[in-house]
Image: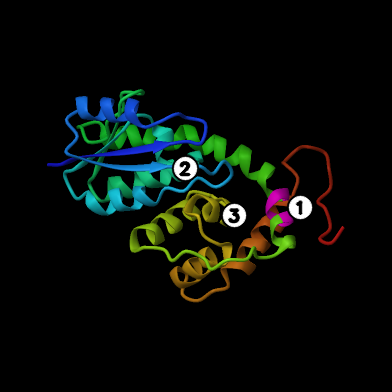
């Protein structure tokens, strides 16, 4: 069983030496490291390499859970993906370890607590999603997604993440994410389906709030 370490250094942090020392002390056999200078779009290309390195029975070791993603939904999707692959995740700061006997129960608890956050943040992101679509596609060829990242896209979508959130996390375009989702859904128009879903959720008021549903186009 191999212990693979992953280090992510954000743009406001100085260097990776602190995390390296912690991972070495935990008996990590191999390390992967991303140093991001981007404040708006964190790039974690070495995380993909680390995910492709680990296999059943291995453990991915990180300093903190936030090293694995910039949103709660992306971290949760990654934990679920690794759980299905029988790969454990151990964090030093939080003392979490999904490789032990209580790993499944721990993942279920994390999922329960993050579900509320996803529900609350989804409404707040809708306006941004529409604004981003109105601006159209930003130039530059989208980065191709590996097989591992394709699985992460599908899981993040199942966890409730928007296409904009997924594209930002993967460092690719929304068009690339839509293509992945359309392939996974047997060719259905993923963009149209998400637009309909967002329109319904945006236009329908919470039960008992005393308001009438909005009319599309108002």
Q: In which quarter of the image is the C terminus?
A: bottom right
Mark 2 or mark 3, earlier in chain: 2
Q: Does 127 sit above or below residue 147?
A: above
Mark 2 or mark 1, earlier in chain: 2
Percent of width and height locating residue 186 = 46, 75
- Label 1: state its secondary structure: helix
Magenta region, residue range? 127-131
Q: How far apart are marks 1 and 3 (CA)?
A: 20 Å
* Number of residue marks: 3
- Label 2: state its secondary structure: loop
Q: Which of 161 and 8 is in front in this view?
A: 8
Q: Which residue is drawn at 46% across and 48% down?
A: 43
Q: Which of 110 and 177 is in front in this view?
A: 177
Q: Distance between the residues labelled 2 and 1?
A: 38 Å
Q: Does 175 sit above or below residue 41?
A: below
68 left or right, relative to 201: left
Determine whether label 2 and label 3 are within 8 Å by CB: no
Q: How far apart are marks 2 and 3 (CA)?
A: 20 Å
Q: Which of marks 2 and 1 is in front?
A: 2
Q: Mark 1 points at which residue?
A: 203
Q: Which residue is drawn at 28% across and 30% down?
A: 20
170 left or right, relative to 211: left
Q: Does 71 sit above or below residue 63?
A: below
Q: Mark 3 points at which residue?
A: 164
Percent of width and height locating residue 101 = 20, 32
Q: Is residue 128 magenta?
A: yes
Q: In which quarter of the image is the N terminus?
A: top left
- Label 3: state its secondary structure: helix
Q: Name the residue under label 2.
A: 36
Q: Magenta-highlighted stretch: main secondary structure?
A: helix
């Amino acid at each position: 069983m191999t212990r693979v370490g992953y280090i992510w250094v954000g743009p406001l942090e100085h260097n990776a030496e602190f995390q390296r020392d912690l991972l070495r002390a935990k008996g990590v056999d191999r390390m992967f490291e991303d140093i991001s200078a981007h404040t708006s779009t964190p790039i974690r290309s070495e995380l993909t390499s680390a995910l492709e390195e680990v296999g059943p029975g291995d453990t991915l070791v990180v300093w903190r859970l936030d090293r694995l993603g910039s949103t709660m939904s992306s971290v949760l999707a990654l934990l679920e993906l690794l759980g299905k692959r029988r790969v454990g995740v151990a964090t030093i700061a939080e003392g979490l370890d999904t490789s032990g006997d209580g790993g499944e129960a721990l993942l279920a608890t994390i999922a329960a607590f993050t579900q509320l956050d996803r529900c609350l943040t989804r409404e707040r992101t809708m306006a941004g999603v529409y604004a981003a679509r109105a601006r159209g596609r930003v130039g530059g060829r989208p980065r191709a997604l590996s097989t591992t990242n394709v699985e992460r896209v599908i899981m993040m979508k199942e966890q409730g993440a928007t296409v904009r959130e997924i594209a930002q996390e993967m460092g690719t375009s929304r068009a690339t994410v839509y293509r992945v989702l359309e392939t996974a859904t047997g060719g259905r128009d993923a963009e149209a389906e998400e637009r309909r879903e967002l329109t319904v959720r945006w236009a329908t008021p919470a039960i008992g709030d005393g308001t009438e549903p909005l009319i599309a186009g108002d």
